[in-house]
Image: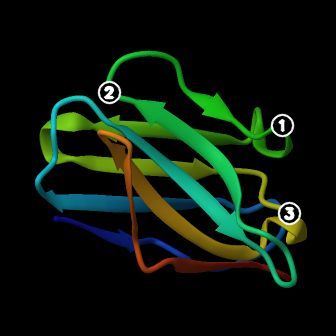
């Protein structure tokens, strides 16, 4: 079993920054993909960014150039640095990890961008 715990959400003004963290524990294999999804009010959950153990990162077009995903594999932790935040980035952000085709989710952390 795998557990994911997110932190770092909150309220920020437009143009501001936040950094989300997600620590994974349990049966974490060396090869996996960690990522961030989000679900805004009245919207479906969507991929924000993903980073495999080895290989390239990927981003949703809406966050390219503003968000950066990174990971510390030794700590089984993934980060999402969010800059130039916009009101449309308001959502619950979920961390996930895919291991051998099994997907695990965190509980979510609220990000609100508002003046």
**Helix, strand, or loop for circle 3?**
loop
Identify the mark nearer the N-term, 1 or 3. 1
The residue sitting at 15% across, 39% down in the picture is 29
Closer to the eye: label 1 or 3: 1
Q: Quadrant of the C terminus?
A: bottom right
Q: Residues within 10 Å of mark 2 (few under 14, many from 20)?
A: some
The residue sitting at 28% across, 50% down in the picture is 77
Q: Which residue is mark 1?
A: 61
Q: Quadrant of the N terminus?
A: bottom left
Residue 106 versus residue 75 in the image, above or below: below
Q: Which residue is mark 2?
A: 53
The residue sitting at 35% across, 61% down in the picture is 22
Q: Residues within 10 Å of mark 3 (few under 14, many from 20)?
A: some
**Is mark 3 in CB contact (under 8 Å) with mark 2?**
no
Whether residue 46 sits left or right of residue 96 in the image: it is: right
Whether residue 95 sits left or right of residue 58 in the image: it is: left
Identify the mark nearer the N-term, 3 or 2. 2
Q: Position of residue 69 (x, y in %)?
A: 52, 40
Q: Position of residue 106 (x, y in %)?
A: 40, 71
Q: CA distance from mark 2 to mark 1?
A: 22 Å
Q: Residue placed farthest to the front in the image?
A: 101
Whether residue 46 sits left or right of residue 22 in the image: it is: right
Q: Residues within 10 Å of mark 1 (few under 14, many from 20)?
A: few
Q: Which residue is mark 3?
A: 86
**Is mark 2 in CB contact (under 8 Å) with mark 1?**
no
The residue sitting at 42% across, 50% down in the picture is 79
């Amino acid at each position: 079993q795998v557990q994911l715990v997110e932190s770092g959400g909150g309220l920020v003004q437009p143009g501001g920054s936040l950094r989300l963290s997600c620590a994974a524990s349990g049966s974490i294999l060396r090869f996996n993909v960690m990522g961030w999804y989000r679900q805004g009010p009245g919207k479906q959950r969507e991929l924000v960014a993903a980073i495999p153990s080895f290989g390239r990162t990927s981003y949703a077009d809406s966050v390219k150039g503003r968000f950066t995903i990174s990971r510390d594999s030794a700590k089984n932790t993934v980060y999402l640095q969010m800059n130039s935040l916009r009101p449309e980035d308001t959502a619950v952000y979920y961390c996930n990890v895919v291991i051998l085709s099994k997907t695990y989710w965190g509980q979510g952390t609220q990000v609100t961008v508002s003046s």
